[in-house]
Image: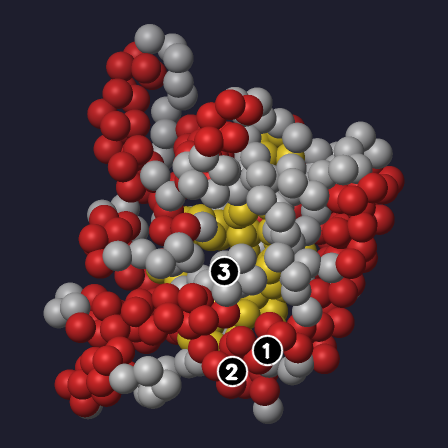
Amino acid sequence: MKGLIRLAVAVAMLTPGIAVPVQRAVDVHSHIITEEYTALLRRHGAELEETFPLPAWNAEAHVAFMDKAGIECAVLTMPAPQPYYGDSHESAECVRKINEEAARVKARFTGRFKFCASLPLPDVDAAIREAIYALDTLKADGIRMATNSRGLYLGDEQLDTLMSVLSKRGAVVIIHPHRPTPYNESTTATTPLAIYEYPAETTRAVVNMIARNVLVRYPGVKVVVPHCGSFLPLALPRMKAIHHAMQTQGYMQPIDWEANLRQLYYDLAGNPTQEVVRTLLTVTTPDHILYGSDYPYLPDNVLQDNLKRLKYMLESDGILSRYADDMLRNNAEKLFNSSIDDNRK
């Protein structure tokens, strides 16, 4: 059967317009961009805070893209930047509207969407209130957190009370990179954040969590690292190599490497090559790798082609082929503890 699938995939790659007949994917990296959110950014002149404009989004167009691409269900998250400009009430109000709109979209398009709720950080108390409301009342499927919220980085001890709340609820946390704090304006002007800083920023935040054993101390939380783990597969060997010396001299605390890493999942947003996926498997297992599109940040046809290439790459690789359906769909279903097909009944 797999031989027939590989043949069909190869033919589809060579013949435009022919669909790839493999299992429909679950997309854990896509975005909801609401009018309230964009209006707040405009009020603060922050439309280009992340060095590139926000794309347009609406639910109908998103579903149309999913149908064409072969995506059964997508997990919605707020993009960057964090909607906080010194007014905690304004931020909390905006985040609440985003989360409620995501809940409405999920209910309207039965089985096609899940969502991870945003939080009005850096106000930790407000974030805890929103997390409880979103998970308990809106029935959010998880929580979306920025790598840093105006300088408050994941792993910071100020977030421990929030992480405790999320751990008790067994929350899935999807990370999204943001502009680092501080950042170098001249280098960013040459290379927009998505080119280099986003992978570096993601790695920085995850390393900070690992160094403080956050995922060991709050084991109910499962964290999805975006963009193929960013630089983490390259950073971990160096961290492990020098950690003992740093700990011996009192600069770092003991780290339970394996227990931290067991809580991490990774999405494949960013059109990874075979080498990238194999490198990712040096720090995780196949059941912790998930498909992600990053919709709507690239044109629909580009994202469709990216998924087609990913399917072909997985199915044609002698080692990865046995995990293709898991990475494209099954792992996400297990992580979010439900069957996509069941949701549609």
Residues at marks 3 and 2, CA–CA distance in whole angstroms: 17 Å
Where residue 267 is drawn, which disc sits there?
none
Residues at marks 1 and 3, CA–CA distance in whole angstroms: 15 Å
Q: Are marks 2 and 1 in contact (CB under 8 Å)?
A: yes
Q: Are marks 3 and 2 in contact (CB under 8 Å)?
A: no
Counting from the top left corner in percent of width and height, residue 53 is at: 62, 48
* Residue 157 visible in the snapshot: no
Q: Nearer the viewer, residue 64 or 214?
A: 64
Residue at image x 57%, y 35%?
179
Circle 2 crowding by C-alpha within 10 Å: few under 14, some 14–19, many from 20? some
Q: Quadrant of residue 97?
A: bottom right
Counting from the top left corner in percent of width and height, residue 158 is at: 64, 28
The number of numbered discs placed on residues in the rendered structure image is 3
SS state under label 2? helix
Relative to residue 224, is residue 254 depicted above or below? above
- Front: mark 1 or 3: 3
Q: Are marks 1 and 3 in contact (CB under 8 Å)?
A: no
SS state under label 1? helix
Left or right: 299, with 241 as reference point: right
The residue carrying mark 3 is: 298
Circle 1 crowding by C-alpha within 10 Å: few under 14, some 14–19, many from 20? some
Check the picture and name the quadrant holding the N terminus: bottom left
Relative to residue 63, is residue 299 depicted above or below? above
Counting from the top left corner in percent of width and height, residue 186 is at: 51, 23
The residue carrying mark 1 is: 63
* Residue 298 visible in the snapshot: yes
Q: Nearer the viewer, residue 109 or 133?
A: 109
**Identity, as a three-letter code, of the amino acid under mark 3:** Leu
The residue carrying mark 2 is: 67
